[in-house]
Image (cartoon, rainbow, N blue to C red):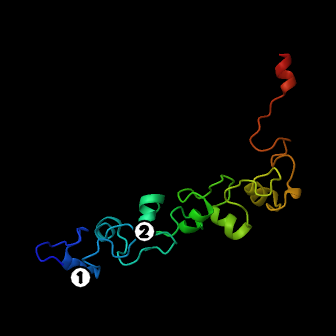
Amino acid sequence: TDPLDDDTDADGLTDADEVLTHTTDPLDDDTDADGLSDGEEVDTHGTDPLDDDTDADGLSDGDEVDIWGSDPLDEDTDDDGLEDGDEVTAGTDVHYEDSDYDGLLDGEEVHTHGTDPMDDDTDGGGRTDGEEVLFDGTDPLDGSDDLSGSADDDGLLGGELDVDVHSEISS
């Protein structure tokens, strides 16, 4: 280290703190090579400057902070049952628990139902995965068993408006 500089690697931690307290390298501003300086890890994010993936979710602390905006101290930032690293791999949103808005958590889709968390109707049968699992009792992987009509028996698929087109035209 440089005896004339109390922070030789300019990472925000004194050389003495690096050696005596954190056991980080006073000659390397990013001891674990995760993209965050040792000082940022200790003073700003509370992450471990000796572990490039503090929460063990498959994403480096630096990528969580600088790229994905996820929490480097929480392996599942959105608490959907799918770890942040798996979300990035699957292309789902680390900030929203239901990336395809079908009513099922991303983790449920991957780990329980085998459905695609990026496709609201995995089997292409006309009903969302959530409608099939939560209301219809049908298989979200088999499009041939999707119910026609809607759960409220109005003859319209969810969300359609009940409008009598003929009476509107003749009025």
Q: Amino acid at mark 1?
A: Val
Residue 30 screen position, x and y as percent: 33, 72
The residue indicated by pointer 2 is 61
The quarter of the rendered structure image containing the N terminus is bottom left
Q: Amino acid at mark 2?
A: Asp
97 sits to left or right of 111: left
Classify 10 Å Cα crowding around label 1: few (below 14), some (14-19), many (20 and above).
Answer: few
Is residue 51 shown above or below 76? Answer: below
* Residue 62 sits in quarter: bottom left
31 sits to left or right of 120: left
Q: Is residue 83 visible?
A: no
Q: Nearer the viewer, residue 55 or 131?
A: 55
113 sits to left or right of 77: right
Specify the label residue 19 is tagged with: 1
Specify the farthest residue to the top.
Answer: 171
Is residue 146 shown above or below 25? Answer: above
Q: Real-space Cα distance between discs 1 and 2?
A: 22 Å
* Residue 14 sits in quarter: bottom left
Q: Is residue 6 visible?
A: yes
Residue at image location 14% in from the left, 72% down from the top? 5
Residue at image location 44% in from the left, 67% down from the top? 72
Residue 27 screen position, x and y as percent: 25, 76
